Image (tube, rainbow, N blue to C red):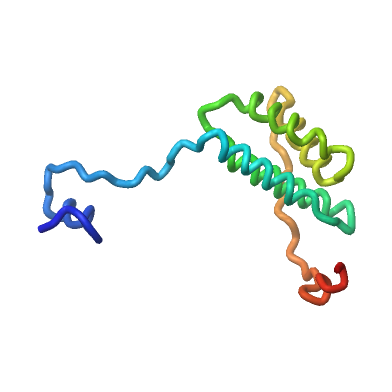
Amino acid sequence: MSTTGRGASERVIAEGSRRAVSLPKLFAHKNCAEGAMILERTLHMLQTQTDCDERVAELARMGFMQWLGGLKGRESFPRQATAALAVAEKFRRSDPAVEAFCGLIEEALLMPPRPMSLALPQKRRRGGAKMRRHLI
């Protein structure tokens, strides 16, 4: 029986073969450009029109969680946070969601560490296509 192709790893296990089967790496290391791309995408998302302070806080929390998910696990958190603050600094004064995002990063850097409130946004209707047409 073949050890390549569709279902090969299952066949090898079923046969009890002693041959090594190369499986895809599930946790491939992210390179530097990918981390910068995630931060850039997060900052772009934060620069949207917001109608109230509550929405600004929701966007900032979602952006912070997205940024956390893109961090490199084997590198220093304070170094990565400081680098993110340096990149976001030029948008901080002009965009309230970026300001709140930077505040969350600064809160995460405080020592001793303590739990942060990162509640997901409440479900609500936003107006759909009619509201988008109204914004144009």
Q: Is residue 132 above or below residue 29?
A: below
Quarter assignment of residue 72: top right
Looking at the image, residue 47 sits to the left or right of residue 25; the answer is right
Name the one closer to the observer, 108 or 20: 20
Q: Percent x, y for residue 11?
A: 17, 57
Q: Is residue 88 above or below residue 7?
A: above
Q: Residue at x 72, y 38 (%)?
A: 116
Q: Residue at x 77, y 67 (%)?
A: 124
Q: Residue at x 84, y 38 (%)?
A: 92
Q: Percent x, y for residue 64?
A: 70, 43
- Quadrant in the picture for the C terminus: bottom right
Q: Percent x, y for residue 4?
A: 20, 54
- Quadrant in the picture for the N terminus: bottom left
Q: Residue at x 12, y 53 (%)?
A: 15
Name the one closer to the observer, 9 or 88: 88
Q: Is residue 15 above or below residue 80?
A: below
Q: Percent x, y for residue 73?
A: 53, 32
Q: How many marks?
A: 0
Name the one closer to the observer, 26 or 113: 26
